[in-house]
Image (cartoon, rainbow, N blue to C red):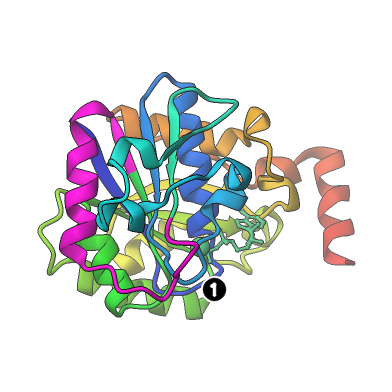
Amino acid sequence: MARKIVITSGKGGVGKTTVAACVSAQLAKRGQRVVLCDADFGLNNVDVVTGVENLVTYDVVDVIEGRCRAKQALVRHPDFGNLYVLTSSHSAPERYVSPQSLKLVLDSLAPQFDFVIIDCPAGIDEGFHRAVASADEAIVVATPQVSSLRDADKVITLLKSYRLAELSLVVNKVRGDLLLTGESLSPQEIEELLKIPVLGVLPEEYSIYGGDFTDLHPAFKTLANNLLTDKRKLYDPTRKYTGIFGNLRRILKRNL
Ligand SMILES: Nc1ncnc2c1ncn2[C@@H]1O[C@H](COP(=O)(O)OP(=O)(O)O)[C@@H](O)[C@H]1O
Ligand SMILES: [Mg+2]
């Protein structure tokens, strides 16, 4: 039976879709059977981010409205046979989808998969509720910026009112150079502030994901490993900035 995990944040642009897509691909690479569900009916960009937009025939609204079965709407990723993308509606993005109907679709798929990863929209209204109500675990994505942490704190309070088995944090867009100079909050400090365990740390790097799942950043491997085991290893974003060349990189980045 699949673990159903929603990737959420409150704030937009912090990396929910990136994390959902790359973690799904990494899990699939590790042999896990994964459904990546786009529950962001407003932006619905998971198909583009995963590069399957030209392979979509049916979407989740087609399943809910009875035009196809749930399995027919899954798009098998061309590079990873274990990764299946369930896109949100393209024909009518504004169409109302109830939390119960999305949950029914995902519950019907769960017995045949190991993971259902749900990409949540920004905000804490109806779309948030719909995505979270279908999940039994949640990962909150936050960046070290104050505005993101404030939104994450609100979302965590809300998530605590759902019956979730796990609630953890991914700290994204961490700048190793600023961590070394003490100008950025560290993932440990963020963990203390938000009071939920850090499951993963991802560096801010332009190349974190350029649309190619065959060359995933090592930080996603560490994160997926933490999901699959009880270990909590965290990627160290400062390692690029130590030593002679690291210091040089730090100076160059500062002057950008
Ligand atoms: N660790 C990172 N380093 C650099 N850019 C990132 C990182 N994570 C995400 N991004 C970029 O930030 C933007 C927003 O990411 P996205 O995953 O769409 O956020 P969300 O789904 O939360 O709105 C995208 O352009 C994405 O490529
Ligand atoms: Mg998104």
Q: Quadrant of ligand 1?
A: bottom right
Above or below: residue 233 compared with residue 195: above
Residue 234 at what x, y percent from top left?
47, 40
Q: Quadrant of residue 154?
A: bottom left
Which residue lies at the image location 10% right of the left edge and 58% below the top edge?
A: 163
Residue type at tag 1: Gln
Residue 106, horizontal then vertical, whole percent:
24, 46
The C terminus - image quarter:
bottom right
Q: Position of residue 34 (x, y in %)?
A: 37, 33
Residue occupied by mark 1: 145
Q: Residue at x 59, y 67 (%)?
A: 184
Q: Residue furthest front?
A: 67
Magenta segment includes 189 = no
Q: Going 35% across and 54% down the picture, which residue do you hit?
A: 62
- Left/right of residue 119 with respect to residue 143 in the rendered view: left
Relative side of 80 to 105, left or right: right
Whether residue 195 can be seen here = no
- Assign the N terminus to one quadrant of the image: top left
What is the residue that sits farthest to the top in this orientation?
Answer: 31
The one of 114 and 66 positioned closer to us in this rendering: 66
Q: Secondary structure at mark 1?
A: loop
- Say which quarter of the image contains residue 39: bottom left
Q: Residues within 10 Å of mark 1 (few under 14, many from 20)?
A: few
Residue 231 place in picture, x, y as percent: 33, 30
Magenta stretch contains residue 103: yes
Magenta residues, start to end: 88-116
Q: Nearer the viewer, residue 104 or 209?
A: 104
